[in-house]
Amino acid sequence: NKIGLVTDDETKQALISKIRKINARARIIETTHAAVDIDDVLGIRAFDLATVVEMDDAFLDVNGTHEHDASVTSVGFTIAEPLNLEKLNAWIGSLLREKGVDIFRSKGILSIEGSLEKYVFQGVHMMMEMTSSAEGAFPKWNEDEARSSRMIFIGRNLDRDELERGFKQCLAK
C-alpha cells in the first residue's frame, strides 16, 4: 500500500527486497489507498501447511515457545453524533505529538458535521492522514446508512478513559 510514497525505482527495489527477506513467496500487489481487486486477496488459498513447515520447521512444535507482548493493547470506541472537523484535527494532532511513540497504529471512519462525505483517518505513530470520500478512494455515506464515528488505537500505555474523553470533546454539539 502507499506505493505513491515511493518516488524512485531504487527505493522501490530495496523495499521489495526487504519484503522478500520476510516472505520470499508473498505476492506483492502495488496499491494506493488499498485499491485492489478483492479477488486478488480473498479466497486465494495462500496458506499451505507444507510450505509453512518448510519455511519454519518449528511451526508445529507444540512444546515450543511463542511470545506475545502483553503491553500492546487496542482501544476503540464508537460515537453516534457527528464530529467537528476542526476540533478533531486539533485533538488528533496533539495526541499524536504527545503520545505518538506509544500509539503504533490508529484508524477511524468518521462522520463530520455538515458533510455528506465519509472521512477516513489513518495514523502510524506520529504520521497521520485523513481523506474523505470526496477524493474518490471510497464511497460516501449511503442515504439509509446510520452514521457514526469509529476510532481504534493500537499501542502501549493506552488510557481508554483519556482517549475516549478526548474523542468525545470533538463532538459537534
Image (cartoon, helix red, strand yellow):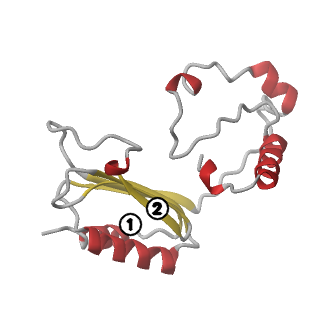
Q: Is residue 155 left or right of residue 136?
A: right
Which residue position holds label 2? 129
Which residue position holds label 1? 160
Looking at the image, which residue is at 46% across and 61% down? Answer: 129
Say if 169 sits above or below 151 in the image: below
Looking at the image, which residue is at 49% across and 65% down? Answer: 128
> Residue 95, located in which quarter of the rendered image?
bottom left
The amino acid at mark 2 is: Glu
Say if 99 sits above or below 120 in the image: below
Sequence-first tag of 2 and 1: 2
Looking at the image, which residue is at 75% across and 21% down? Answer: 49
Residue 29 x/y as whole percent: 65, 35
Front-lying residue, 79 or 142: 142
The amino acid at mark 1 is: Arg
Residue 18 x/y as whole percent: 81, 49
Q: Is residue 109 left or right of residue 72?
A: left
What element does badge 2 sit on?
strand
Q: Is residue 37 left or right of residue 169?
A: right
> Does the image show residue 165?
no
Numbered disc in front, either 2 or 1:
2
Residue 54 x/y as whole percent: 87, 26
What element does badge 1 sit on?
helix
Number of residues whose C-alpha sits closer than 10 Å to that of mark 1, classed few (under 14), some (14–19) or many (20 or more): some
Residue 23 x/y as whole percent: 79, 37
